[in-house]
Image (cartoon, grey):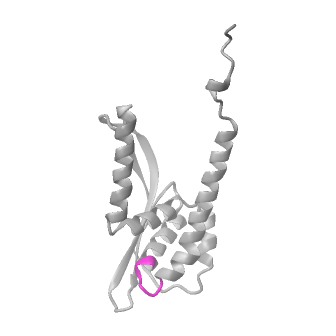
Amino acid sequence: MSRCLDIFLKLLIVQIMTKLVPSAPRKVWMAILAKASPASLEKCFASLNSVPNYHFLRSPEIGLTMVRGRMEGTGQPFNLGEMTLTRCVVQIAGSAGEAIAGFGYVAGRSQRHAELAALCDALLQHQDWHETVYSQVIEPLRQAARDRHSQQEAQVEATRVNFFTMPRGEG
């Protein structure tokens, strides 16, 4: 019982802190861009009319990263294994002439996915592009992720077994 309460309190604190941290919106859109399928990101990005010129600070690179885990989320960390990761950094000019850097980190080997994620990150930091990119790229990707999650929940719920309603063989 106390373990469940501890987990609940930790989740509640994380939710509260996420709302207080000013970089939380960026974390959200970075996660949405990274988890989106490359095809859906490409489709949403194509809906933007003309994007500003950009150049690579770091062209898309494929590498490995170590995935670490913890037993039950609180134990000692251990190396779970390696996964491929593609990263990219682009730079655009801001409205006042300042340089804005956008970062893209995605799982797998899709260099185009990392490039588009980095470019969207830079555009979302640009005051003239933020609303457009958010409404035409981030919101559709977020809705697609919610739909996938709802579909998975429905599939899991269809196979749920309630052991308390089954006869116990008494009598």
Counting labels gives 0
Q: Which image quadrant is residue 9 in?
A: top left
Residue visible at 64% across and 58% down in the picture = 147
The answer to which of 22 and 124 lies nearer the viewer is: 22
Image height of 33 relative to 131, above or below: above
- Quadrant holding the N terminus: top left
Whether the magenta-drawn stretch holds residue 128 is answered as yes
Please state the extent of the stretch shown in magenta in the rendering: 124-129
Image height of 100 relative to 16, above or below: below
Whether the magenta-drawn stretch holds residue 55 is answered as no
- Find the residue positioned furthest to the top: 171
Residue visible at 69% across and 7% down in the picture = 171
Magenta part, dominant SS? loop
Left or right of residue 89, residue 149 in this image: right
The answer to which of 143 and 123 lies nearer the viewer is: 143
Residue visible at 67% across and 9% down in the picture = 170
Image height of 80 relative to 96, above or below: above
Residue 95's spot in the image, x, y percent?
A: 39, 91
Residue 137's spot in the image, x, y percent?
A: 56, 73
Residue 55's spot in the image, x, y percent?
A: 42, 80
Residue 3's spot in the image, x, y percent?
A: 36, 33
Q: Which image quadrant is residue 94 in?
A: bottom left
Left or right of residue 13, residue 60 in this image: right
Left or right of residue 12, residue 34 in this image: right
- Using the rendered image of the protein, determine whether residue 71 is visible from the camera's viewpoint: no
- Using the rendered image of the protein, determine whether residue 77 is visible from the camera's viewpoint: yes
The answer to which of 10 and 80 lies nearer the viewer is: 10
- Find the residue positioned furthest to the bottom: 96
